[in-house]
Amino acid sequence: MKAIKSLLVFILLIVAGLANAQFTDRYWAFGDSAGIDFKNTFNPQAANSILRVRGTCASICDSAGELLFYTGSPNWIEWLNPAGLVKFGTVVSKNHQTMQNGDTLIGGLWYQEMAIVPYPGNSNLFYVFCAGVTTYKGLFYSTIDLNYNGGLGKVIQKNVQLRNDTLVDCIAVVRHGNGRDWWVLVRTWKNVPTNDITAYLITPTGVTAMPTQYIGANVNLASFYRMKFNTDGSHLYNACQVGAVERYDFDRCTGILSNRVVYSAPGGSINGYWDFEISHDETKLYTVRNMQGPLQNKTYLNQFDLDPSTFYSSSNQLADYIFPEQGGAIKMGPDGKIYFTLGYLDSDTCYDYLNCYGSTSITNTTLSVINQPDSTYPACDFQPYGFYLGGHKSYYGLPNNPNYELSNWVGSPCDTLTVGLPNIDGRRNELKLYYSSEMRTVFINAEKLSGRNAYVQFYTSSGQLLEKLSEPINAGYFTYSSSFASQPDGVYIIRLITEKEVLTGKFVKR
């Protein structure tokens, strides 16, 4: 009876949310050309994509559930190239083709390093954020404009770098309490214990870093740290591979974390949690634990009660797997069910089925499903290999999509657009340069430009003019990338000249 009531409540929330939402999470693109169409949440259907990704992917739909675009890392075309593995991200239009200027986004073969965030106040603009975990360091964003190419879109800003330190493989996103703006949360990954979390406020004026918060357990080498919000965005949960599971209150008005609750303390080994998901009623936690060391090659899928005093004693094991089956992502779908994916590989050195493993199996052509996640096992109705992907293959990743249908925080200090917003403008008229040593390419971005045409000049530090070009400016945005593979290491200067302004910046090639 409890399960039926929970399902009815969730269905009513879905219907209400879809009626008011501007964007939704109704089409998943992931794995090896796999997808799920949730437009009919009562009967989701296997779909397709052009992705070839072991992990990182994200997607977004309009209010009717129609796909707008999706993204993933690496660039799907490079999977088809047996000469080597290229670690780029890509943006894909709704007709499953690479979007204009949608190649060579920052990406590094991780799992939850990318996320799509609507641009507040403009229904045709979107950010794609990417966390640099290993190959690329820092937090980056690119901007997509769907006004171009008949709604298929164009990347109008690419690889704008917000910071240059190494981040954990996870970006957590939640809507601001005012219902318009967004929060993007990241944390650092270092070889020394850290417990810092930084929230970025996304408003119509741009992206602004809020003061870094130091909260929770200090964790060392936790590259697979996961951060996820509960359904209403009031709590942020953390879990990582050294065994820590924590919860914090999250103020959607201020971005402040508080009131730490510890379910599991870090144990020091790397046999902890690879991924997790929270039930809709926030009474259950589902974890994926990939074991290493003496117990290596083993995956456990467990359910826990979200009560600190009974967390360990309440554990129920739903399933276990032996390599080459290995646990991947676990995520709640738009239908209120929780989906779980398994990778099927006998080596961690080859990442795509096409070039490494041509065979298919029930493992990589299905997702497992928890149909009643609010209920205690076995009433949660876990169905292993329960959703057939129509011949496409799963991998370790599922889309890192936020709850796009979350509304404003009614009754809060910021439930209107005129209260609780800092007076900031993150979109300064400046030249933003990022040089990628892996791509040997410099990415040039600028916005809020007054002119209509840009003249770009490249100089050495001694003043020698290397190149000049002319490019149009679209709606105040300018983006361009240029290979510096043939140039020696050193300092280079770039000038962007329009009819209204002159911007200058420099970068170091090393």
Image (tube, rainbow, N blue to C red):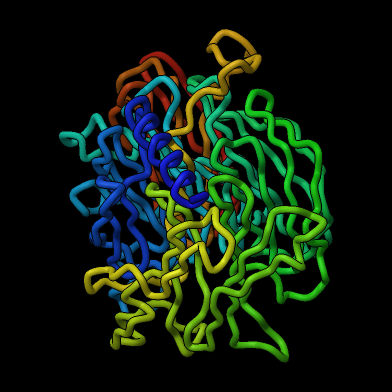
Q: Is residue 48 left or right of residue 327?
A: left
In which quarter of the view is residue 451 placed?
top left
Q: Image height check: is 179 above or below 222?
A: above
Above/below status of 236 relative to 306: above
Front-lying residue, 246 or 119: 246
Is residue 284 at least partly visible in the picture?
yes
Q: Is residue 214 left or right of residue 171?
A: right
Instruction: State which quadrant residue 69 falls in.
Output: top left
Foreground: 383 or 424? 383
Residue shown at the point (55%, 73%) measured from the top left: 318
User: Is residue 453 toward the left or the right of residue 238 in the image?
Assistant: left
Residue 175: x %, y % from top left: 53, 31
Question: Residue shown at 57%/63% (left/top)?
Answer: 135
Q: Percent x, y for residue 355?
A: 32, 83
Task: Name the residue located 69 percent from the left edge and 68 percent from the top edge.
Answer: 315
Residue at the spot 40% in from the left edge and 63% down from the top edge: 74
Task: Describe residue 440's horizontal placement relative to residue 194 as left or right.
Answer: left
Residue 368 placed where, x, y %?
Answer: 41, 70
Residue sticking out furthest to the front: 1
The picture places residue 441, in percent across and down from the top left corner, at 45, 54
